Amino acid sequence: MLAAVFHAPNNITLEQVSTSRTQAMLKVNACAVCGYDVRVFRNGHRKVNPPVILGHELCGEIQSDVRVNGITLRAGSRVAMCPLIPCLNCPYCQSNRYNLCMNLKEIGSSSDGGFAQYVAVPEQIVRIGGLIPVPESLSNEEAALLEPLACCLNSFSRMAPIANGSTVVIIGDGPMGLIHLQLFKRFSSSRVALVGKVSQRMERASVMGADAVFYYSSKTVTDILDFAGACAGANAIVIATSNPTAFELATQVAARCSKINVFAGMPSGQTFLLDANWLHYNQISITGAFSSTPAILAEAARIAAEKTIDLSTIITHRYSLEEIEKAMHTTERYCGLRAVINKF
């Protein structure tokens, strides 16, 4: 099959490679380019041991019948795939929290992913129910974004419950920030502000229903506090950018009894200093959110099929597999939102 093989930072090549036959093989219909893929392409990553095929946000067709959760998925069926490859033995796996597995591996990092014509599905993914049927109402491209939607749903659940009339601030105007925006607008009675730096993305946030959009600057704190009004700060804050300055902004605009969720990964070794008494006396909660689970991915498919969350609004660029480097460049330059590889 044809695949884009990552060999080292800034070295990804199109090659004919042999496929590893497994119980489940997927013909890839679409695979989105995540910011993580770009960071690996540019700098490598501790989880990635080249050569490997990147790409974990994908939709594919099953090549032969496979049993998942007691149901037979027929050859030709479209599925989205949970990219987690858990050990199945640790305490977290035993409680179905596969994203917290103590020996976790992942499609597109430690195992070949979706920037290829086919992808082999590890047995562990089949066993945890990690192949989710794609509803007919979703295009292949939308289905490729079910995985990032599931990640945002996991994040949203970490912030719950959201009281009526809450003030929510999302820091980050990328695809994940805008999916969070849709979730808060659809599933809570909140006033939602988004903080960003890219004008086109901020305009898109306004169209999607943001109650306020602030350009990140020296007066952002004042803008947010004015927006929050009597609450004297935001009740819920999502950090949807890997820029460490976002954490400092979050602490400056957090209301009493607020929740700060670190959704995006930060640079390796990043640390923050906090005033313990500020946490204590203001009852601040700081949480993190990583990936999702098959159950959450199934929920993502349901709400996307109903168009409660419109994933088509997140897709702005389409490329062939031969244009993988161009797709990477588009993503790292913050052009549009999600780029999708849809021609193999």
Image: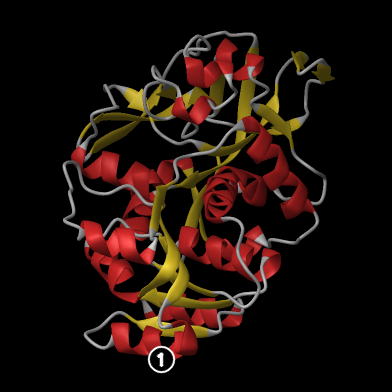
Comparing 53 with 206, the one in front is: 206
Seen in the picture, residue 279 relative to 212 is either above or below; the reply is above
Q: How many marks?
A: 1
Whole-percent x, y for residue 246 in the image:
28, 65
Q: How is the image coloured?
A: secondary structure
Seen in the picture, residue 105 relative to 317 is either above or below; the reply is above
Circle 1 sits on which residue? Answer: 226
Q: Residue at x 68, y 46 (%)?
A: 300
Whole-percent x, y for residue 1 in the image:
50, 22
Q: Is residue 182 left or right of residue 302?
A: left
Whole-percent x, y for residue 155 in the image:
52, 50
Seen in the picture, residue 61 relative to 158 is either above or below; the reply is above
Query: What amino acid does circle 1 point to?
Result: Asp
Q: Is residue 290 left or right of residue 311?
A: left
Classify mark 1: residues with Cα within 10 Å, few (<14), some (14-19) or many (20+).
Answer: few
The answer to whether residue 169 is visible is yes
Whole-percent x, y for residue 133 in the image:
76, 34
The answer to whether residue 86 is visible is no
Comparing 160 with 177, the one in front is: 160
